[in-house]
Image (tube, helix red, strand yellow):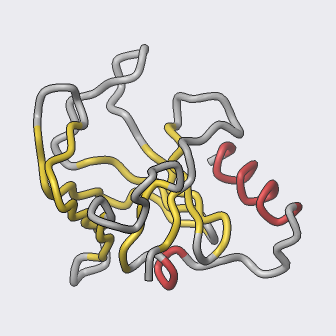
Amino acid sequence: MKVISIFIIAIMLQGFTQPLSVRHHLPGKWDWQTLEDSCGSTAQTYSFSKDGQRIILTAPSPLTLDGTSELNQVVYEIIDERPSVMRMKVIGETRTTENGAPVVWDLILKDKNTFCWHRTDWPAGTCTQDLNKCE
């Protein structure tokens, strides 16, 4: 909870006056900002399950999460939700932290067209490269 609070404060200090809604802005196609063909053939689709308890990531080509398994679809179970941040775990996740706990992710919505991923075992304020909305 402390990490989520730190991120929310950091986002608001960057000039956002109203918290963003992950549920409102996430659905659609997103891709890594650093890719040369960003929002082309590599764009991934994010959607919510009908009951709203899961996020479904659908990729155009297989993703490797743990170094061995290749999946075209990854399903995240939502654990907690705050303005601009959703905490979740991958269903069937095999990766663990150094302490042996399952990996847990925060999806941090920076603005309506940008988000990043933060693992809860990473230092506060660290994030993956940004993903940009394609639609």
In the image, taking residue 88 as reference, residue 70 lies left or right, namely left
Q: Nearer the viewer, residue 41 or 1?
A: 41
Q: Nearer the viewer, residue 90 or 37?
A: 37
Query: In which image quadrant can residue 3 be found?
Result: top right
In the image, taking residue 34 as reference, residue 43 lies left or right, namely left
Residue under the point 21% across and 83% down: 50
Residue 119 locus on image (x, y percent) = 49, 38
Residue 29 locus on image (x, y percent) = 36, 74
Residue under the point 28% across and 27% down: 95
Q: Nearer the viewer, residue 94 or 28?
A: 28
Badge count: 0
Residue 77 locus on image (x, y percent) = 29, 58
Residue under the point 58% across and 79% down: 21
Query: In which image quadrant can residue 126 be found?
Result: top right
Residue under the point 45% across and 52% down: 36
Q: Is residue 86 above or below residue 50?
A: above
